[in-house]
């Protein structure tokens, strides 16, 4: 399955079926301070487990960081 994550094309085999599965893989389950958009639509955290991924989706993952 081909997905674009933060403007980088990535391939997943076997295909990922849910946004929650992608986040577990990409962020090691650390979802505090994370925002997600798929195809320019923000996905609320309450919908992550039920959001289905499709081939060629464009996903933006934003993580908050501390600094000054």
Image (cartoon, helix red, strand yellow):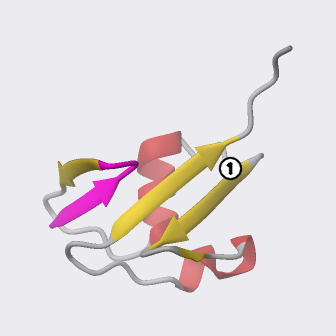
Please state if 36 lies on the left or on the right of 44 as rendered. Answer: left
From the top left corner, tell me how far across and down residue 21 is, in percent.
44, 63
Relative vertical location of residue 23 with respect to residue 39 in this rendering, above or below: above
Q: Quadrant of the N terminus?
A: bottom left
Residue at 73% x, 78% y: name it: 46
Q: Is residue 61 above or below residue 55?
A: above
Q: At which x and y percent is residue 22?
A: 42, 59
Q: Which residue is at a point 21% across and 72% down the rendered structure image?
A: 56
Q: Which residue has dot 1 on it?
A: 31
- Compared with residue 63, is residue 11 higher up or lower down, i.e. above or below? below
Is 35 situated left or right of 18 in this image?
right
Most distant residue in the right direction: 68
The kind of secondary structure element at disc 1 is loop
Q: Is residue 22 above or below residue 64?
A: below
* Extreme residue toward the top, this view: 68
Q: Quadrant where the C terminus lies?
A: top right
* 32 or 64, nearer to the observer: 64
Residue positioned 28% across, 58% down in the render: 4
Q: Is 37 situated left or right of 34 in this image?
A: left
Q: Residue at x 29, y 68 (%)?
A: 16
Residue 62: x and y, percent? Answer: 60, 47
Between 15 and 6, the one nearer to me in the picture: 6
Q: Quadrant of residue 48?
A: bottom right
Callout 1: few (<14), some (14-19), or many (20+) C-alpha neighbours within 10 Å? few
User: Which residues are drawn in magenta?
Assistant: 1-7
Query: x, y percentage for residue 20?
Result: 52, 66
């Amino acid at each position: 399955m081909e997905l674009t994550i933060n403007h980088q094309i990535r391939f997943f085999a076997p295909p990922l079926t849910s946004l929650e599965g992608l986040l577990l893989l990409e962020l090691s389950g650390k979802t505090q301070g994370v925002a997600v958009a798929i195809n320019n639509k923000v996905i609320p955290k309450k919908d992550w487990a039920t959001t289905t991924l499709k081939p060629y989706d464009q996903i933006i993952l934003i993580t908050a960081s501390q600094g000054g």
